[in-house]
Amino acid sequence: MADEERRQQHNSGHHEAHKGHRSHHFLVVAHGIQSHVNPGRALVHRLTRLSVDGSILATLSVPIHTHRRMFPSLDGAEETTDGVITYVPHSDGLDDGSTPKDAEGTARRRRASAESLSAVVTRFAARGQPVTCIICTMVLGPVLDVAQEHDIPLAFYWTQPAIVLAAYYHYFHGHGELIASHAADLAYEVSLPGLSRPVRIRDFPSVLVDTTGSELAKAINEMVRELFEHKNQWRPKVLVNTFDELEATVLAEVKRHLDVFAVGPMVGSSTEARIHLFKHDDADKKRYMEWLGAQPEMSVVYASFGSVSKYSKQQIDERVAGLRQCGRPYLLVVRKDGLEEDAGHCLETVQDQGMVVEWCNQLEVLSHPAVGCFVTHCGWNSTMEAVVSGVPIVGVPNMFDQPTNAYLVEEEWAIGTRGERNSDGVLTGTELARCIELVMGEGAKAMAVRARVKALKGIAQEVADEGGRAERNLRDFVTAI
């Protein structure tokens, strides 16, 4: 179909939608992993809540393989709804969940995703529900192609902190050579505009200082470079899952270069239904929630290390040893698919002092009064959930934005501490126990950490409340489209 014909069809559908009193239809396209699906779903819910007359429609689209995990009782390509959100899968050409092995495979996936998403947009237009804005997480390439093809406004949903967005921006605008040339020197400090202090290389997002030639790092960097490359042509809006009280100076800096809207904390509530891409049923939940209910207030160490990384026997052994050494009850989350082959047996003997589960409703756990500390990989969702729950953090960062998030936790916000790995890259049990005591004990630092995180919790709740700053910023975004 020619571009002009597509544009006429879109405009005709847009006119019909207005006749039905719909002013906007947001298509939110989320990367198909746990850390993107729930923030994407929370954004869709927030968008629909802005309108009491149904004038805002929002749809969530994830790859077919993720859609199957979200709705195992449905056919993989079947559209569904929960009464508020419509879920429409798209094909990325790899419907078994595999990932491309090289640049050619990445290009094929981009073409397949663009073709499938274009068909989704066309179907909605034919229904009289034309898409008026596409919002994406880490699916920029194909979404950019579809937005250009159909002449639809584009927005990017940044599911990491604003400081990481700033680091990327300045990497591609004058600081890339400096950062790359010192990537192997973890102690080297870089000063960037808008940052309150120099940041060490070890605290940068790992893909920006990658020295291994990782194809994943190259793909992520290329995606962000493309966002900046097209910013002058498309002026994409950027929604950031953060709030001003957390990153005021950095947000002010990136707003000089990009149309940024701080719409966080985008974590929902502890009672709101959530998507689980891993095994989690009512029996599991009943077991760990009853166990938490039997523990004293602020006594439990909750430890979970995200949905992506795998761990060796040595790493698991040391973390279990640290949890036992600290002498406090603990709830440990260990995914079976996150264990290397020889690591599983070490968990069989650790349940006398604590509880081990494969997966849990993390926000509900963090909101429980028995939880006094969160040992985490410092993914951004986990970090934000700890903030809104008022739980001190022991950071054990691994990759992506996690080192930067741990830097924020320890040095910018003072709501926790970062565990230091030994020369072999392992966090020892002794170090983990030391960090837990540092934030859960009765020392001056522990008391200061607990006071600070409690204060941040109150601020976060005020920002996220109905009519709060997050809602106002999101409304400003909708008005700007």
Image (cartoon, helix red, strand yellow):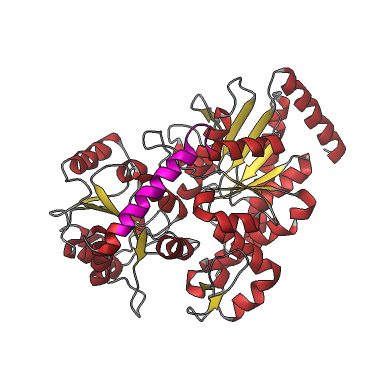
- So how many labels did they put on this image? 0
Asked if residue 339 shows in the view, the reply is yes
Left or right, 77 with reference to 128? left
For the N terminus, the image quarter is top right
User: Is residue 71 part of the magenta span, yes or no?
Assistant: no
Instruction: Using the image as rendered, state which of residue 450 and residue 284 is in the foreground.
Output: 450
Say which residue appears at 58% left-offset and 33% top-offset: 47
User: Is residue 456 part of the magenta span, yes or no?
Assistant: yes
Q: Position of residue 436 (x, y in %)?
A: 26, 62
Say which residue appears at 64% left-offset and 68% top-offset: 171
Q: Which residues are magenta?
A: 448-468
Q: Position of residue 348 (x, y in %)?
A: 18, 57
Left or right, 25 with reference to 433? right
- Magenta stretch, overall SS: helix
Say which residue appears at 21% left-offset and 58% top-offset: 347
For the C terminus, the image quarter is top right
Say which residue appears at 36% left-offset and 54% top-offset: 452
Q: Quadrant of residue 444?
A: bottom left
